[in-house]
């Protein structure tokens, strides 16, 4: 048995924890540079606002429909996610954090009324963190994901499924005829593992519901489509194909890319941005205890602007694998120097750390001359990370990143960002007597 705990409209819900005045209003959270909607409240969805809708196309709804738009505040969302996941873990003995707002729980061996237990955990998350969530349970991870969809859809749209499945849905507890009814009322595209392209192919041959998909022959599905879709069919039939991944695989590459708040053409400003991006990537690299062997840096103009276009990248191999910020930044700046051309209005840059290996693996070499081997700067990097984690990101940085402030024209637009209520001391509200 598996359960999936999923925060409802998570980014919007995080904002509403500290802004109860937003409840009942249409709210959207915008992507980097306030480009497009990446999260929508149910009220915003009812207005027809689609996921990814450009902000400039829906901005008029602020006046016409009381729409509230907020810049993304990922530090806040990550902190509330950690709190929610720690409470969700009480549902069962093993947990897989699938995304910032989703968590699979292994219910194997858990006794008692699972629905009542799930309702209690849901109520605790709502009371202690303030995040409403849906919980779905099933014999496989695909069925648990489907049950979660049913639980949230029933609460949001009464009448779509039986009312008792709202908020918490246990498909394993349903009678076969009731389970068939639920599967028959679920569109095939709403099944986890069925993408838009595969969904269109299935609908074209008359497979429009989850029930019809579950009744297909797995061998035929594998021969006609793929082993992935075969696994989905088997999981819908109750045969587990995916276990709980309590220790996610190490990333094969680490990337940090951003669009600029406004076009950049000056090399010094580009060097500041690339230094910042490489430093952030290096911090991510150390978090997973990895070393990088190559550094890729790229720059490009905006394809949406009517102006000369330019896009180039360079990969710089390192003498030896490293997680040292100074080494990685140095390689990124060397790559940037080789691809930079004046006269272009650049809109985006990025740094990718490639050919990763585990930190315990060290490359040995002979010191044939004095100073041939670099000094061990592990403690320095640990101190750097510790200071930035304790006092805020950007507290200590390399000189080539420049000084934070309005002079950084390349930083993202976040004109509508809410305060860091739980992540920044300076943003704490002050109550005066």
Image (spheres, rainbow, N blue to C red):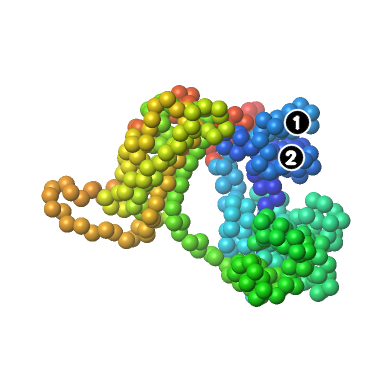
Residue in the picture at 70% in, 32% down: 57
Q: Which image quadrant is residue 98 in?
A: bottom right
Tell me the quarter of the image containing the C terminus.
top right
Q: Which residue is mark 1?
A: 61
**Considering only vertical position in the picture, is 78 above or below 416?**
below
Closer-to-camera residue (100/393): 100
**Residue 52 locus on image (x, y percent):** 66, 41
Residue in the picture at 55% in, 42% down: 75
Q: CA distance from mark 1 to mark 2?
A: 10 Å
Element marked by disc 2: loop
Tell me if 142 is positioned left or right of 342 in this view: right
Closer-to-camera residue (22/125): 22
Q: Is residue 357 visible?
A: yes
- For marks 1 and 2 on the same chain, the one whose residue lies earlier in the sequence: 2
Please tell me the numbered disc located at residue 23: none
Residue in the picture at 57% in, 42% down: 74
Q: Residues within 10 Å of mark 2 (few under 14, many from 20)?
A: many
**Residue 145 locus on image (x, y percent):** 68, 62
Tell me if 153 is positioned left or right of 266 in this view: right
Tell me the quarter of the image containing the N terminus.
bottom right
Q: Which residue is mark 2?
A: 49
Picture mark count: 2
Q: Residue furthest right?
A: 159
Closer-to-camera residue (241/121): 241
Q: Is residue 43 visible?
A: no
Q: Residue furthest top?
A: 407
Q: Which image quadrant is residue 172 in?
A: bottom right
**Considering only vertical position in the picture, is 345 above or below 73?**
above
Residue in the picture at 75% in, 60% down: 203
- Could you tell me if the residues under marks 1 and 2 are in contact, i.e. CB atoms within 8 Å? yes
**Considering only vertical position in the picture, is 90 above or below 313?**
below
**Residue 44 locus on image (x, y percent):** 75, 40
């Amino acid at each position: 048995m598996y359960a999936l705990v999923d925060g409802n409209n998570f980014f919007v819900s995080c904002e509403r924890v500290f802004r109860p005045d937003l409840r009942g209003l249409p709210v959207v959270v915008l992507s980097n540079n306030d480009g497009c909607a990446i999260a929508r409240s149910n009220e915003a969805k009812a207005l027809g606002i689609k996921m990814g809708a450009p902000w400039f196309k829906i901005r008029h709804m602020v006046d016409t429909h009381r729409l509230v738009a907020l810049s993304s505040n990922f530090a806040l969302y990550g902190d509330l996610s950690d709190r929610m996941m720690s409470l969700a873990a009480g549902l069962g003995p093993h947990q897989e954090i699938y995304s910032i707002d989703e968590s699979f729980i292994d219910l194997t061996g858990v006794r008692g009324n699972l629905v009542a237990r799930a309702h209690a955990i849901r109520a605790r998350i709502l009371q202690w963190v303030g995040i409403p969530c849906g919980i779905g349970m099933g014999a496989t991870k695909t069925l648990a994901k489907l049950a979660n969809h049913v639980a949230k859809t029933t609460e949001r749209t009464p009448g779509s499924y039986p009312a008792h499945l709202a908020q918490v849905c246990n498909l394993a507890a349903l009678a076969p005829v009731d389970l068939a009814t639920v599967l028959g009322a679920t569109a095939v595209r709403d099944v986890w593992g069925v993408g838009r392209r595969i969904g269109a192919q299935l609908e074209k041959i008359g497979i429009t519901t989850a029930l019809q998909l579950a009744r297909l022959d797995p061998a035929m599905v594998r021969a006609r489509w793929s082993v992935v879709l075969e696994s989905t069919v088997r999981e819908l039939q109750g045969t587990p194909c995916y276990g709980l991944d309590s220790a996610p695989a190490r990333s094969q590459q680490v990337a940090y890319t951003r669009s600029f708040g406004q076009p950049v053409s000056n090399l010094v400003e580009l060097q500041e941005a690339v230094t910042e991006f490489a430093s952030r990537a290096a911090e991510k690299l150390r978090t997973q205890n990895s070393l990088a062997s190559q550094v890729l840096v790229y720059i490009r103009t905006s394809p949406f602007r009517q102006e000369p276009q330019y896009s180039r990248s360079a990969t710089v191999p390192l003498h030896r694998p490293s997680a040292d910020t100074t080494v990685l930044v140095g390689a990124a700046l060397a790559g940037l120097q080789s691809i930079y051309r004046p006269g272009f209005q650049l809109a985006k840059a990025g740094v990718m750390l490639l050919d990763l290996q585990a930190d315990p693996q060290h490359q040995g070499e002979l010191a044939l001359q004095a100073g041939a081997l670099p000094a061990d700067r592990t403690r320095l990097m640990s101190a750097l990370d510790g200071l930035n984690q304790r006092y805020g990101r950007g507290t200590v940085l390399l000189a080539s990143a420049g000084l934070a402030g309005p002079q950084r024209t390349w930083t993202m637009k976040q004109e509508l960002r809410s305060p860091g209520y739980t992540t920044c001391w300076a943003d704490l509200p002050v109550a005066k007597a």
